[in-house]
Amino acid sequence: MAFFLWKGKLYVIMNIDLTQYGWDNFFEHSKKSSENKTLEHGRVISVHKSRYEIVCHSGVFSSEILGKLQFKKDPMDIPSVGDWVLFAWEGDMPVIHELLARKTIIKRQKKHDHFPKPIAANVDKAIIMQAVGEDFSIKRIERILVHLREARVEPIIVINKIDLLEGGLEGMRRDLASLDTTIPVVLSSYKTGEGIDRLESLCNPGETIMFIGSSGVGKSSIINTILKAEKQETQEITLRTGKGKHTTTARRLFITDTGVLVVDTPGTREFGMHGENDKALNESFADIESLLQGCQFSNCRHGNEPGCHVQNALRTGEVDTETYNRYLVLQNELAQSAKQMRQSEKQSTRPPQELPARSVRKGKKS
């Protein structure tokens, strides 16, 4: 660590090794292919509206984004937590000029959004965290798994606060067994320490691990345990409602003493489907999809038509009825989202002369 004095201010040169933050040959090649390859590079570790906190060789700095990037039409072109960027110094402020290629990108679409938005980039694994009680939802787990499959991010399921469970775990285990059995499942309690060692063993040095879950499920507490420091504020669950309070207010990337990179996110329950989830959804419900392809008629609606493999599988118990109904809900939401995206794209590509004229006297009586 070194110091220098410039314009009456004392600056610290930290000389950070960015390979510890995930810089590798993939991003090096992306930078060499850029027109801005002479600029410095850094990784976005938090986003606060139009401000981006980045880590680079010389330290951690609050930065801004170049105007032409800030007003990009596609929200996917805007930097997110975990992104690698190229920046130039303007005085003592770094300004982001370019977003480098991504290995992975996790995105979601809220109910009234026309297009999906990025949540975190260059993530290797994602921990879907829920708590026992009302927060546990196999539907929400399935929904998030579709998004992670589309992003090609490896999932880990963590069910936390098992110390609060009055009954047994049989019902919860039975629900979890209906999912892909290759996905690791950890039953944990940050108060007793149960499951923490196994969770840490699933997170390797150099990997970027993202935590996804509702408020109050214990994400921040588990992260603090892994980080061995109180870097994330925690709050107790609200006794009156049984729901958690928001503690994490912004997505942020941390590095642990063991070299694992952790991304914490604000509590969220809404993980809407978007038009690019179709292939991932089919892969997530591959057993149902194979039945759909085997029906006698190509236009089978899977109702009372003869030769319907789906209805036969439901009658014999080969396919669980609840699982099939959850699949139909996701398929319907996906179709609606894809239709909405097509309409938005069609409107955005209309020539200016075809746009309806807007009267400046709108609202005035004749």
Image: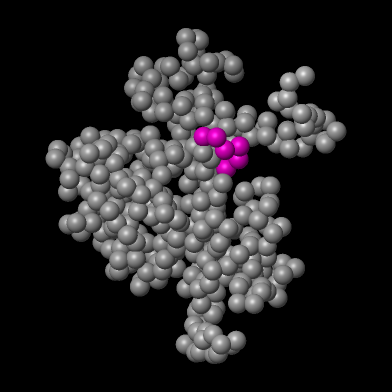
Look at the picture and state if 84 lies above or below 354.
Answer: below
Q: Is residue 114 magenta?
A: yes
Look at the picture and state if 44 lies above or below 353.
Answer: below
The residue stretch that appears in magenta = 111-116
Residue beneath the point at 57% across and 42% down:
116
Residue beneath the point at 59% across and 87% down:
6
Instruction: Tell me, yes or no, if residue 139 can be seen here.
Output: yes
Instruction: Tell me, yes or no, if residue 18 can be seen here.
Output: no
Q: Which colour style is shown?
A: one colour
x then y, percent, for residue 8: 56, 87
Residue beneath the point at 72% across and 67% down:
34
Image quadrant where residue 349 sits: top right
x then y, percent, for residue 45: 49, 64
Quadrant including the C terminus: top right
Task: From the image, give the main secondary structure of the stretch colored magenta.
Answer: loop
Front one among 212 and 203: 212
**273 relative to 26 in the view: left or right:** left
x then y, percent, for residue 269: 40, 40
Image quadrant where residue 144 sits: top left
Front one among 152 and 291: 152
Front one among 182 and 361: 361
